[in-house]
Amino acid sequence: MKDIIKESLSKSLTYLEYRKVVSELLLEGKSTGDVQSEELLHYSNLNETRMNRLEKTIAITPENVERLKLLKKKYLWIFISEGWCGDAAQLLPIMHKMEVLSDNIDFKIVLRDDNEDLMNEFLTNGGKSIPKLLILDSETLEVLGDWGPRPQEAFDLVKNYKEKHGVIDETIKTDLQMWYLHDKGLSTQKELLEMMRLIEIQE
């Protein structure tokens, strides 16, 4: 596993590098990933606009700022993503702001299709669902926990819709984006910091 992680880290991007890669590909009419299509390009363009907005509007609550500052050890967060992924676009600005506020979080992004071996270690119900956040000990590269592909309430929203209608269509995609809009990143902050609290208790 550590060899897989080291290989992925050699191809990893900072948040700003990731934004640049996605933006430059869009200028060429491309999305990240092995598959290119008009649909994925459309979603990538939507996500670019969405992330630009979220960078300005998403805020980490004062309580969560304090919790971030209380982290005792140094952690590496590895986020598996692609530019066309709507959930990733909603979550990345939050995690980036959390990283900026903490001296103990090093945040790296890897592209799913460029890191198949890593992705295969963290499947969701047998599928390569993204995004996925891996939390590692910075020194040992031991994986201490993983999270994703979305906050629990949003995960349940999609799961229940699929069980009822048998598909993931534009209706649920719109409903999911509305959920994120109203949630304002609070569920993500809460779940990640609770996960960090439990990791620190166990160590």
Image: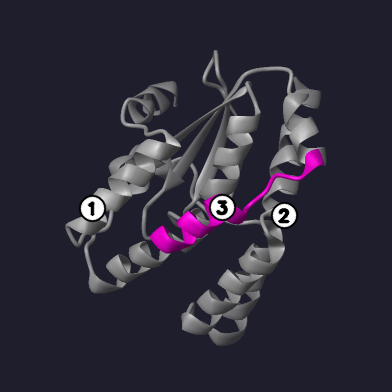
Instruction: Give SS at disc 2.
Output: helix
Q: What is the three-letter code of the residue carrying label 1? A: Leu
User: Extreme front residue here?
Assistant: 56
Residue holding disc 3: 56
Residue holding disc 2: 187
Disc nearer the start of the sequence (2/3): 3
Residue 105 in the image, given as x and y percentages of width and height = 59, 26
Could you tell whether 165 is left or right of 116 in the image? Answer: right
Residue holding disc 1: 25
State whether residue 40 appears in this view.
yes
Counting every numbered tag in the picture gives 3
Distance Cα–Cα, label 3 vs label 1:
23 Å
Q: What is the three-letter code of the residue carrying label 3? A: Lys
Where on the picture, by quarter, is residue 117?
top left
Where 197 sits versus 74, above or below?
A: below
Instruction: Give SS at disc 3.
Output: helix
